[in-house]
Amino acid sequence: MSARRRTAFAVALACAANALPAQAFDRPYLATSNAVADEDDDQAWSFEAWSTRAGPVGAIAVAPEYAFSPTTTLQLELTRVRDHDSGTSLSLADLEFKHLFNHIARDGYGWGVVLSPGVARESGHAWQRSELSAKGVYSLALWEGEGLLHLNAGVSKPRVDGRQWVSSIALEREVGKRTTLFGELAREGEAQLVHGGVRYWVKREKLALDVAWQRLRANGANASGLVLGFGWYDL
């Protein structure tokens, strides 16, 4: 939830010739974190898992998260990326800390900060620090609470490269009792992501499934593919 999380840009990293940093994010997004404080998230656990495919590169990730309070969370994301053409793989581990400064249900908007250090390990090599990122997050309630707009902006510092500016915009709207459409545009350095799909709540605010399509561009390489996700909340 490095965003939480970094799967989208980890896939781009594996597709591209050079290393590419990653952002934290919140599901169902791949590069965008939200600033939504859920009153049910008080000393509660959640668990998310997802898989992505972009060209020959696939990734599987799991991310347990603990909410100390509705405004403060800590999440660990573990990701395995594999290039099926070359047989090479990359393992990633990210710890994400998010703190919000207000409640969107009260104010109609929310804002906060996300900090995320990460480590990575290529096949046959030792774990190494991969990056440290920080960003501000903002969410705005729309359509009388049936939709949300999310804005992120910040910076990441990879281990081997200079600072990279990160930014994203995401929009979601309820289109049925249990169905939400979502989409996002994101940029990190020269890397670009377009991503959108649908999330279905099997049990409202408890169990969710999502399916989406992504398109990535990084270091001159392009890739697109399917994203499948699962979320179990308020445990």
Image (cartoon, rainbow, N blue to C red):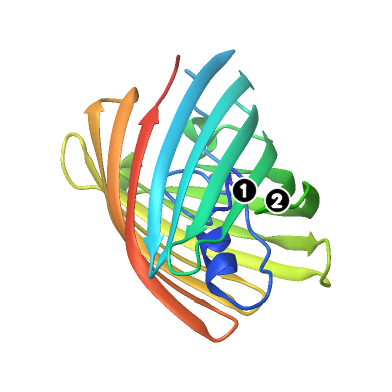
Q: Position of residue 91 (x, y in %)?
A: 62, 48
At 75% from the left and 54% from the top, the residue drawn is 133
- Residue 191, disc: none
Q: Rate crowding at label 2 as few (under 14), some (14 to 19) or many (20 or more) other CA atoms within 10 Å.
A: some
Q: Quadrant of residue 194?
A: bottom left
Residue 46 visible at all: yes
Q: Amino acid at mark 2?
A: Arg
Mark 1 neighbour density, 10 Å: few (under 14) some (14–19) many (20 or more)? some
Image quarter where the C terminus lies is top left
Q: Quadrant of residue 158?
A: bottom right
Of residues 118 and 201, which is closer to you in this image?
Answer: 118
The local secondary structure at tag 1 comes to: strand
Query: Which of the image's four quarters has the N terminus?
Result: top right
Q: Residue at x 64, y 59 (%)?
A: 22
Which badge, 1 or 2, comes first in the chain's sequence?
Answer: 1
Q: Estimate the spatial distance between the alpha carbons at disc 1 and disc 2, rounded to whole Å.
A: 5 Å
Q: Is residue 201 above or below residue 80?
A: above
Percent from the top left, x then y, of residue 21? 68, 63
Label 1: which residue?
91
Q: Which residue is mark 2?
A: 121
Q: Left of 201 or right of it: where is 185?
A: right
What's under tag 1, amino acid-wise?
Ser
Residue at 54% x, 37% y is 107
Q: Against 147, is 20 above or below? A: below
Q: Are marks 1 and 2 in contact (CB under 8 Å)?
A: yes
> Which residue lies most toward the left here?
176
Image location (x, y in percent) of residue 8 = 50, 59
Q: Position of residue 120 (x, y in %)?
A: 71, 50
Position of residue 22 relative to residue 12, above or below, is above
Rendered view: 108 above or below 226? above
Residue 42 visible? The answer is: no
Helix, strand or loop under label 2 = strand
